[in-house]
């Protein structure tokens, strides 16, 4: 195994690691920034204590995690931080920068199981019908939200869509998901109709705001440029407020609802996994728990209604023995 060059620091290796993730693995700038913050934070923690990051032990890393936990970091964030840093140390071993995986066998903090929230069909309908279809922005926003829900897209996949990636005749789109993985998403008639009208009446007017600068993006802002993920988040929340929806609505909630409603309708788990672009069925399985939870809630409400009707109805007179 090659030895680490004396002039190489852990920080220099981190730069190389992040470059590889960006170029080879196709990780997004957002992911790279988070990795730099997570791993860089640990490297700084080591330096401040006079520790060489390339020579640390599991015990040192446990102390680091303990300090983060004592500082109030949530278990979910702690688990992500531990996983990210450990991934870097596994890479160091593969590169020959260390003689072993120095964090091998480290116990990850257990993340509490949280079921994703979903939007019920009635609330969803209020949200989707909130845009004013008499304006180009309203046509765009209706099509955008219909596609987020009807196709189960991530917000990053939505804003990255170009015109050539959508096939309205087939009700499908080719998207690039996590790790630059390409997949085919399908969407139903509501999304198809909303997209058709937006492309015919809304997008040409928005494109005119670009002053001749053509954009291939499917969804445009008022200047004719590509809509950003932050803008989409704000748009969805504004419509939720306008519709009087008290729940915190965000784009990913529409993706959760898409998956849960499919399973409620009897869709196969493997199909839902493919549509969502999950690498493992384990990730998709959490929606089956949400679906069962919703079914249990509906059953409970039905029993309560039956009980209320029975109590509110006329009391049946028990027949006397002579009448029996």
Image (tube, rainbow, N blue to C red):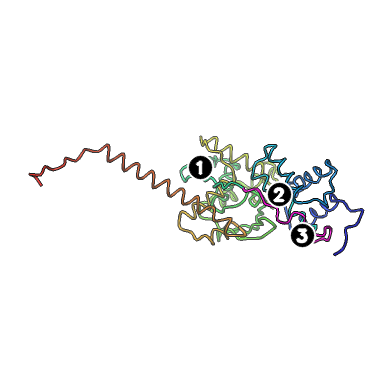
The residue lying toward the viewer, choosing from 150 and 221, is: 150
Find disc 2 in the rendering and name its residue. Answer: 82
Find disc 3 in the rendering and name its residue. Answer: 24
Q: What stretch is highlighted in magenta?
A: 93-110
- Which circle's residue, 2 or 3, is located before the other in the chain? 3
Do callouts 2 and 3 mark residues in contact (Cβ within 8 Å)?
no
Which percent across, then down, holds residue 218? 65, 51
- Which circle's residue, 1 or 3, is located before the other in the chain? 3
- Which circle's residue, 1 or 2, is located before the other in the chain? 2
- Residue at 70% x, 46% y is 225
Find disc 1 in the rendering and name its residue. Answer: 129
State how far apart marks 2 and 3 are (Cα): 23 Å
Do callouts 1 and 3 mark residues in contact (Cβ within 8 Å)?
no
State how far apart marks 1 and 2 are (Cα): 43 Å
- Residue at 71% x, 49% y is 82
Q: Mark 1 or 2, which is nearer the eye?
A: 2
State how far apart marks 1 and 3 are (Cα): 42 Å
Q: Image quadrant of residue 67?
A: top right
The residue lying toward the viewer, choosing from 308 and 119, is: 308
Is-magenta flag for residue 212?
A: no
Predominant secondary structure in magenta? loop
Mark 3 nearby-residue class (10 Å; few <14, some 14–19, many ≥20)? few
Q: What element carries label 3?
A: loop
Left or right of residue 47: residue 185: left
């Amino acid at each position: 195994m090659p030895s680490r060059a004396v002039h190489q620091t852990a920080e220099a290796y981190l730069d190389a690691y992040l470059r590889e993730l960006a170029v080879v693995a196709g990780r997004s700038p957002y992911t790279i920034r988070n990795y730099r913050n997570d791993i860089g934070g640990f490297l700084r923690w080591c330096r401040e204590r006079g520790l060489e990051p390339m020579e640390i032990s599991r015990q040192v890393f446990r102390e680091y995690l303990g300090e983060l936990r004592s500082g109030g970091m949530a278990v979910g964030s702690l688990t992500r931080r531990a996983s990210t840093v450990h991934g870097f140390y596994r890479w160091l071993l593969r590169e020959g920068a260390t003689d072993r995986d120095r964090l091998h066998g480290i116990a990850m903090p257990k993340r509490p199981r949280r079921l994703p929230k979903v939007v019920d069909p009635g609330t969803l309908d209020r949200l989707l019908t909130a845009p004013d279809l008499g304006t180009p922005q309203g046509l765009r926003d209706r099509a955008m939200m219909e596609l987020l829900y009807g196709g189960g897209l991530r917000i990053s996949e939505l804003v990255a869509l170009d015109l050539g990636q959508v096939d309205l005749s087939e009700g499908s789109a080719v998207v690039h998901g996590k790790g630059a993985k390409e997949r085919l998403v399908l969407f139903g008639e509501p999304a198809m109709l909303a997209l058709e009208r937006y492309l015919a009446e809304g997008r040409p007017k928005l494109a005119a705001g670009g002053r001749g600068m053509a954009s291939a993006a499917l969804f445009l802002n008022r200047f004719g440029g590509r809509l950003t993920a932050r803008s989409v988040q704000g748009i969805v929340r504004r419509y939720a407020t306008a519709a009087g929806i008290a729940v915190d609505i965000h784009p990913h909630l529409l993706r959760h609802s898409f998956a849960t409603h499919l399973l409620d309708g009897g869709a196969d788990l493997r199909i839902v996994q493919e549509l969502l672009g999950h690498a493992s069925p384990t990730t998709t399985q959490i929606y089956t728990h949400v679906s069962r939870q919703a079914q249990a809630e509906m059953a409970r409400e039905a029993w309560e209604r039956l009980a209320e009707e029975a109590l509110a109805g006329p009391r049946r007179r028990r027949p006397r023995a002579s009448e029996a």
